[in-house]
Image: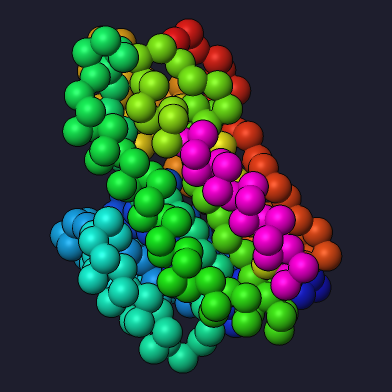
Amino acid sequence: MTAKRQPELVGRTALVTGASSGIGRAIAVRLAVAGASVVATGRNRRALDELAAAADRREVDIHLHPADITDTDARAELAEAVRQLPGSLSIMIHSAGAYQRSPVAEADISDLDHQYAVNVRAPYALTQLLLPELLDAGRRSGGDIIFVNSTQGITASPNISQYAATKHALRAIADSLRAEVADAGVRVCTMLPGRTATPMQRRVVQAGGPSWVPDTLMAPQDVAEMVTVVLALPIRTTVTEVVMRPARMLPG
């Protein structure tokens, strides 16, 4: 008789941003199924309630904390809520993101400011707030920070210079942070998924004209599964970057 497999992340507490939909939502559910105590945050309260219902169907618990992480006070309240949980934070997943598409000649600078605020400044500031807790976890049994980036953080495509610039910046933050905290037992990984069947990707595809064919894309659950694999590795091993793309490559 085969022994029942122990969930991979029992005893760990995780914060997942951007958990209202898409990849963030899939990660929150998957980590909870893996045994982690999950705090899920996002701006859309109704979407978070739907996440809670999905978690109930899987018979796992997820703590909800609606917040706009671009707001200084909201970030501070979120960090304090995480500190009040029974378990100490040992996993932080940055999955919140904003996307605007426009050629350089026509792009609105206010769109660049917004994407910078969501994609760069907010995760940087939130990491600063909760880094002491993650360093404590690292010294005890290991800590993890995962930045959900994009393949645009590797090579920028036409018409998305602003978004790609923020993703290149986020990758640089991860690289620098990794070197700073490795000796304290905290691992830092950048996930670089390509086209994934998320609500954001649907808006991107439809804005560009092609038909929406989600079966040709990755699923958010695929990224969530890879995140769980990275987190479950022995603390002696770190994965610095993971590039994921749909098996069926499409133009553009």
Residue 181 placement, left or right of 62 = right
Q: Which residue is drawn at 49% across and 27% down?
A: 152
> Considering depth in this image, is 243 or 168 the residue closer to the camera?
168
Vertical placement of residue 161 versus 139, above or below? above
Vertical placement of residue 231 versus 84, above or below? above
Residue 28 seen in the current view: no
Report x, y in % for residue 91.
55, 68
**Is 70 within the magenta?**
no
Report x, y in % for residue 35.
56, 74
Vertical placement of residue 28 versus 227, above or below? below
Report x, y in % for residue 95.
42, 51
Vertical placement of residue 76 versus 193, above or below? below
Q: Which residue is drawn at 28% across and 32% down?
A: 112
Residue 75 seen in the current view: yes
On-image quarter of the C terminus = top left
Per the rendered image, the range of residues in magenta is 167-185
How many numbered tags mark residues here? 0
Residue 190 placement, left or right of 130 = right
Q: Which residue is drawn at 62% across and 82% down?
A: 136
> Considering depth in this image, is 225 or 85 the residue closer to the camera?
85
Farthest residue to the left: give it: 46
Q: Which residue is drawn at 49% across and 20% down?
A: 156
Residue 223 placement, left or right of 17 = right
Q: Which color mode does the image show?
A: rainbow
**Is 182 within the magenta?**
yes
Residue 75, quarter of the rendered image: bottom left
On-image quarter of the N terminus = bottom right
Residue 216 placement, left or right of 184 = left
Prevailing SS of the magenta stretch: helix
Report x, y in % for residue 130.
47, 73
